[in-house]
Amino acid sequence: MKAVIAQHGKASVADIERPSLEPGHVRIRTEYSAISPGTEMTVIKNSEEHKSVLGYSAVGIITELGNQVEGLAVGQRVAVYGAPYVRHAEELAVPSNLTAVVPDHVAPEEAAFAGLGAIAIHALRIADLRFGESAVVVGLGILGQIIAQISSAAANQVIAYDLNKVRADSMRKYITHVYDTEAELEKQILAVTGGHGADSVILCAGGPGEPLINSSLKWIRDKGKIVIVGDLAMNFDRGLMFSKEAQVLISRAGGPGRYDKGYELENKDYPIGFVRWTEGRNTAEYIRLLAEQRISVQPLISRVVPFESAAEAYEHYGPGSTIMGTIFKYD
């Protein structure tokens, strides 16, 4: 079967081995898969001789059930998340823990972003925002836009910021307070929070961290939180952090279970009484938000690219790019 790989600093479509079906896993015919620009562009840039299969978020139809699978059926549409099981590939074999059933009225194109949705939800759980509290979302690529929408749906006061005016303008469809200059942002943070500062700053940008984290330490309230989601170097001023007894946290992927062989490969779920929100449950929450029309991802889909032409899709990302969401369509 064919998949999208990174090799020698480039992306291409190549033949790979068909995945075996382990107990607790389901086989899926892929309909759409979504690019995660930050992660995948980094993998492509750093790729050498070894082939790396790209992708971790998709939607498709179940064609076969492995042993011990319960609650799923052949023919169901499911959203799936988590490499190496989920990839830009024609066929997938995925632990049932990492699937979420997609209702008929939810567009599969939106469901394809389930991985990014789970990552967004987990970042907000790390921020631990409560009803009415304030969040500044910095970096309005596809992930930052999803985080801002979900946070607003949860009744947080959301302030969004991106130097790219096109991205900032697109966010204004969903929330009121969106800015593309730091001066405007800082003025509004003080107005929205009564001068106290934001409860949390969620950083979805990448690159050198010191200027951005130091600015965030000024934007938060006393004992506020900074959550790093993007690929950001973690350098910052200790004095600024100390003065507010701030917390600088990092959000790891889509939630508890990620990178755990027992949860993923062996499909052993965590008891809900001990781990309320796993990566699988966060994925299902993203689908629920779509189903209840609390968020909308369709307007964020910039391009639908035939799978056979996947390699050229990455050429549209880079500094200054205004491309938001890209999905691959499989025949």
Image (tube, grey):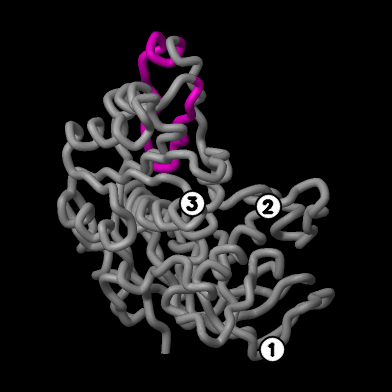
Please report whichever mark, 1 or 2, sits nearer to the chain's N-terminal start. Answer: 1
* Residue 195: image location, x then y, percent: 34, 25
The residue indicated by pointer 3 is 155
Q: 10 Å neighbourhood of mark 2: few (<14), some, or many (≥20)?
A: many
Q: Residue at x 71, y 60 (%)?
A: 265
As drawn, is 77 to the left or to the right of 206? right
Does residue 89 show up?
yes
Q: Nearer the viewer, residue 149 or 238?
A: 149
Question: What residue span does the magenta drawing correspond to?
Answer: 223-242
* 131 relative to 152, above or below: above
Q: CA distance from mark 1 to mark 3?
A: 38 Å
Query: Residue at position x 30%, y 30% from top?
Result: 190
Of the numbered discs 1 and 3, the one sitting upstream in the chain is: 1
Task: Report which residue position mark 2 lands on.
Answer: 277
Please name which of the two marks, 1 or 2, marks the residue nearer to the observer. Answer: 2
**Residue in the image at 27% along x and 43% along y:** 161
Residue 48 seen anywhere in this rendered image of the structure? no
Residue 231 within the magenta-colored segment of the rendering: yes
Q: Is residue 271 magenta?
A: no
> Callout 3 environment at 10 Å: few (<14), some (14 to 19), or many (20+)?
some
Dot 1 corresponds to which residue? 74
